[in-house]
């Protein structure tokens, strides 16, 4: 397992996390087996916005003995009083739900307490007016909540909340479909969504990814908005290449599905190569590097995708990106302008020209 560090909290988080929406459907024995299998394979980050209240009891059985080794992401606003997932902004219902979740997980603390489902700015207003946000802050002051996060599908709402609340973590819906304006939660333009990733990277707010397969649509050619299926490994690699992303949270209904997801860790570069999305990218995405590294190998040895990423992040006021760029053994200034990368880029980026632009930019930093 690979781990990435949340710069704000210091937590080392597995790049493959665990989404729990469907795990309870397999029944108690299989659900507990699957959750424990995730832990034994290095997964340490778990999102508890689940479809079924029984999920919490299954987690108690599977992970209570290793609670200190795992990170739980719990949602202030998710409600399970009916036995199934519900959503509320009522403060008393939120309090009862959080207490219930803690009891059924057999834990007395929450690693990441999330304000849940903030898709509209008026949702944020409701959470503040009803006292839910103050309750979350109070829980943090008391040490019950270690860190604060937010969950949203909407860039405009995310920007406002980041301005006002400075969260430690963002749960965002990330996949090639949404980023390319296709699908139910494809909110914001190509540039709006890219700006969220860069802002999170610059400010140290980690991103945990929900819906990496667009609810399974991207994996089925008959449902894919592109008319062509992607593989699970292509989708996972795409999300992990976005700036700011620490972990992706695919759901697994059983141990067989989880085993397939874990296969990503040993998959070849060819199996993870998502450059095919360049064939159906919208006009406003053409000519923009997505760090897919399909341009490799560079005859000089420049990591072209990483050079591009540090450049984009630096322009977004990420001072650490400047340091990382200067720490590269080879950078844009080492380009010999052979043009091989230009012909390979599926997104129409003229990388040889861009290397000049990047080298000139960092000369004066």
Image: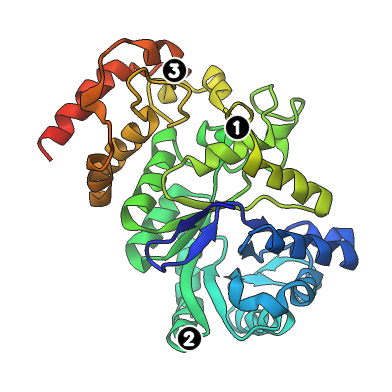
The residue carrying pointer 1 sits among few (fewer than 14), some (14 to 19) or many (20 or more) residues within 10 Å by Cα, namely: some
Q: Is residue 314 above or below residue 225?
A: below
Does 153 sit left or right of 257 as displayed?
left
**How far apart are the two marked residues, 2 and 3, measured between alpha carbons?**
49 Å
> Residue, x 60% and y 32% (percent of image)?
272
Q: Position of residue 355 (x, y in %)?
A: 26, 23
Q: Is residue 1 above or below residue 267?
A: below
In this rendering, the label closer to the viewer, 2 or 3? 3
Q: Position of residue 319 (x, y in %)?
A: 23, 50
Residue 119 in view: no
Does 94 sit left or right of 323 as displayed?
right
Mark before the other along the chain sequence, 3 or 1: 1
Q: Residue furthest left?
A: 364
Give me the disc on residue 345. Answer: 3
The residue carrying pointer 2 sits among few (fewer than 14), some (14 to 19) or many (20 or more) residues within 10 Å by Cα, namely: some
Mark before the other along the chain sequence, 2 or 1: 2
Front residue (pair 32, 331): 331
Residue 35 in view: yes
**How far apart are the two marked residues, 3 and 1, measured between alpha carbons?**
16 Å
Q: Quadrant of residue 343?
A: top left
**Proximity of marks 3 and 1: CB atoms separated by less than 8 Å:** no
**How far apart are the two marked residues, 2 and 1, measured between alpha carbons?**
40 Å
Q: Quadrant of residue 284?
A: top left
SS class, disc 1: helix
The mark tally for this picture is 3
Mark before the other along the chain sequence, 2 or 3: 2
Give me the disc on residue 272. Answer: 1
The residue carrying pointer 3 sits among few (fewer than 14), some (14 to 19) or many (20 or more) residues within 10 Å by Cα, namely: many
> Residue, x 51% and y 23% (percent of image)?
281
Give me the disc on residue 143. Answer: 2
């Amino acid at each position: 397992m690979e781990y990435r560090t949340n710069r704000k909290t210091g937590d080392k988080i597995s790049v493959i996390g665990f989404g729990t929406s469907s795990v309870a459907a397999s029944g108690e024995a299989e659900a507990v087996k699957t959750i424990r299998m995730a832990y034994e394979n290095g997964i340490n980050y778990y999102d508890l916005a689940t479809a079924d209240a029984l999920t919490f009891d299954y987690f108690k059985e599977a992970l209570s003995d290793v609670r200190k080794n795992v990170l739980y992401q719990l949602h202030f606003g998710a409600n399970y009083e009916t036995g199934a997932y519900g959503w509320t902004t009522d403060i008393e219902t939120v309090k009862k739900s959080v207490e219930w979740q803690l009891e059924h997980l057999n834990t007395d603390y929450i690693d990441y307490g999330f304000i849940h489902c903030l898709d509209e700015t008026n949702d944020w207003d409701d959470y503040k007016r009803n006292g839910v946000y103050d309750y979350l802050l109070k829980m943090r002051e008391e040490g019950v909540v270690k860190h604060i996060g937010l969950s949203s599908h909407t860039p405009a709402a995310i920007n406002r909340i980041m301005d006002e609340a400075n969260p430690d973590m963002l749960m965002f819906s990330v996949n090639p479909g949404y980023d390319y304006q296709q699908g139910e939660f494809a909110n914001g333009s190509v540039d709006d969504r890219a700006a969220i990733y860069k802002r999170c990277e610059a400010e140290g707010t980690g991103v945990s990814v929900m819906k990496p397969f667009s609810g399974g649509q991207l994996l089925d050619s008959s449902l894919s908005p592109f008319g062509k299926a992607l593989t699970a490994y292509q989708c996972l690699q795409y999300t992990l290449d976005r700036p700011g992303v620490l972990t992706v949270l695919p759901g697994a209904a059983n141990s067989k599905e989880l085993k397939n997801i874990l296969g990503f860790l040993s998959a070849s570069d060819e199996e993870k190569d998502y450059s095919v999305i360049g064939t159906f990218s919208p006009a406003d995405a053409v000519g923009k590097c997505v760090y897919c590294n399909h341009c490799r190998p560079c005859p000089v040895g420049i990591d072209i995708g990483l050079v591009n990423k540090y450049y984009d992040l630096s322009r977004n006021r990420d001072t650490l990106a400047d340091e990382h760029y200067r720490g590269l053994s080879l950078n844009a200034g080492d380009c010999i302008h052979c043009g091989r990368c230009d012909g390979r880029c599926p997104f129409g980026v003229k990388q040889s020209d861009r290397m000049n632009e990047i080298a000139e930019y960092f000369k004066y930093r």
